Image (cartoon, rainbow, N blue to C red):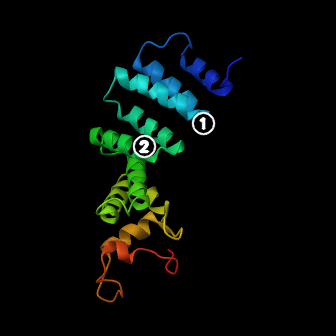
Amino acid sequence: ASEYPEALKFCELLGIHQDRKIDFDDWFKEGLCYFMEDQNEKAIACYENALALDPSSFQAMSNMAIGLLRLQRVADSFEMFRKALSMNPNIGPAWLHIGRYYIEHSAEVEGAYEKAVNAFRRAVEIAPHFSESRVVFPLGGVIASVQYIVDDAINVDSTDDDHHLPLNDRWPTKSKQH
């Protein structure tokens, strides 16, 4: 009996056999099967094997980054997303996760809010539906949409009480939720 029955059925449909993984596609597809079953450690191992055969696969890197994120390995996920984006800058979900990383690590990263805005802006350019994605700010658990964050960064006018403040001091607080 298999420990991943549904994924195994999918792998069989794709023509992958457990005893034979000889090329990038075999490892990548098996990684997808494990990924579908939320077996992220096994998926990551498959993506690592796939990347050993094709180190330029931004798809394997991006999928691996999501698996790392699911395992709460945030810093590793961030680095893998960055590597994937260096090969293909048009991966919208990667930009979204990069922006969230900067928000979550704003106390540790110089210019984190500006970097987050740029990442969110890029994500929305690639996939406009990301504008409705939500971001949770670490202090106070304030939630804001990506679109609000981007708009707030570029639409500051002289009537805004906070227009003179640095970007990170203008962002939502418990009293300002958007």
In this orientation, which residue lies closer to the viewer: 96 or 82? 82
Give percent across and percent down for residue 54.
Answer: 34, 23
Under mark 1, the amino acid is: Asp
Left or right position of 67 against 10: left
> The residue tagged with tag 1: helix, strand or loop?
loop
Q: Is residue 140 above or below residue 47?
A: below
Task: Check the image and report above or below for 149 versus 16.
Answer: below
Q: Earlier in the sequence, mark 1 or mark 2?
A: 1
The structure residue drawn at horizontal position 36% and vertical position 22%, both measured from the top left corner, is 52
| Residue drawn 44% across the image and 28% down it | 47
Q: Amino acid at mark 2?
A: Ser
Residue at 33% x, 89% y is 159
| Residue 49, above or below 22 | below
Q: How many marks?
A: 2
Q: Quadrant of the N terminus?
A: top right
Mark 2 crowdedness (10 Å alpha carbons): few <14, some 14-19, many ≥20: many
Q: Residue at x 56, y 28 (%)?
A: 33
Residue count near mark 1 (Cα–Cα under 10 Å), binned few <14, some 14–19, many ≥20: some
Q: Secondary structure at mark 2?
A: helix
- Whether residue 18 is visible, yes or no, is yes
Front residue of 164 and 127 = 164
Which residue bears the numbered disc 2? 77
Quarter residue 60 falls in: top left
Task: Please identify the quarter of the rendering in which residue 124 is found.
Answer: bottom left
Q: Position of residue 118 (x, y in %)?
A: 31, 60
Q: CA distance from mark 1 to mark 2?
A: 16 Å
Q: In the image, is 112 to the left or to the right of 43? A: left
Q: Which mark is residue 38?
A: 1
Indicate the quadrant where residue 114 lies: bottom left
Residue 69, position in %: x, y? Answer: 49, 44
